[in-house]
Amino acid sequence: MKYSTIIFDMDGTLLDTIEDITDSLNYVMERNGLNSFSIDRVKHMVGSGSAVLIERALEGGRENPDFDRILSEYSEYYEAHCNIKTGPYHHIPELLQALKNKGYKLAIVSNKPMAAVEELRKAYFDDFVEVAIGVTDKLRRKPYPDECLFAMEELHSSKEECIYVGDSEIDHQTAVNTGLKCISCLWGFRTKQELLDAGAGDNYFVNDPLEILDIIC
């Protein structure tokens, strides 16, 4: 066994969350008389957390006088509607079952709010994932290494035992900053070329979740 511990990103890696995120963003934008966004556009706005999503959506970003209010409205609405159209990607349940059967320790590290991370973990991964970490006031969010390091501490795992799995340039940089090897998923929110352009050339690339088993075993 090359590794004992697998740390997963959530959005675009384990779960296809983009429709619920887009619907929540557009609900708040339209409610405030602002422009809505396509799913493809939102795919390139996510990855760094809710505040950055709203910053990218609003004219003037964080300097917009309505930034804090709209961020609060979005966070509240999304938390209540984070599991309407969301679901695991094809072969993710089979992958996690195989990893559990082989005795791997599994964690989720996400830039989603902690409440949404925990709700979705319980809904889809309660039998598999021991530790799930979302955004809190106590840890710096990805690409800082804090959340991954905390997950490793909770699982009593060393860096040498861990590998990180994600779909975006944020995930690649998180792995680099944490000192972990990275598996980049090509079913998520970024293309392979976008990842290569972000410096992820030394990563493993997979087109199907079950290919991860060939890398880590």
Image (cartoon, grey):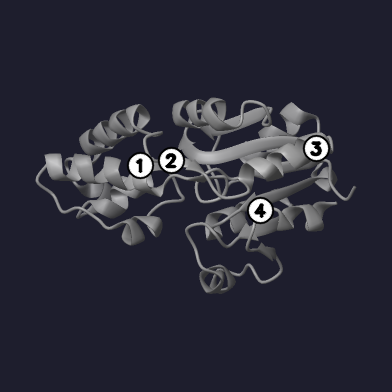
Q: Mark 1 = which residue?
A: 20
Q: Amino acid at mark 2?
A: Thr
Say whether disc 4 or disc 1 marks the residue closer to the N-terminus. Answer: 1
Q: Secondary structure at mark 1?
A: helix
Q: CA distance from mark 2 to mark 3?
A: 25 Å
The residue lying at 73 percent from left, 43 percent from top is 6
Q: CA distance from mark 2 to mark 4?
A: 17 Å
Q: Which mark is residue 86?
A: 2
Say whether disc 2 or disc 4 marks the residue closer to the N-terminus. Answer: 2
Say whether disc 4 or disc 3 marks the residue closer to the N-terminus. Answer: 3
Q: Secondary structure at mark 3?
A: loop
Q: Amino acid at mark 1?
A: Asp
Q: CA distance from mark 4 to mark 3?
A: 15 Å
Q: In the image, is 5 to the left or to the right of 63?
A: right
Q: Amino acid at mark 3?
A: Tyr
Q: Mark 3 = which residue?
A: 104
Say whether disc 2 or disc 3 marks the residue closer to the N-terminus. Answer: 2
Q: Secondary structure at mark 2?
A: loop
The nearer-to-camera label among 4 and 3 is 4
Q: Where does residue 167 sit, x and y in percent of width and height?
A: 56, 56
Q: CA distance from mark 4 to mark 1?
A: 22 Å
Q: In the image, is 146 to the left or to the right of 32?
A: right
Q: Is residue 54 above or below residue 84?
A: below
Q: Which mark is residue 209?
A: 4
Furthest-left residue in view?
Answer: 33
Circles 2, 4 touching at the beta carbon (< 8 Å): no
Assess disc 2: are there few (<14), some (14-19) or many (≥20) residues with their C-alpha within 10 Å of its C-alpha: some
Q: Amino acid at mark 4?
A: Pro
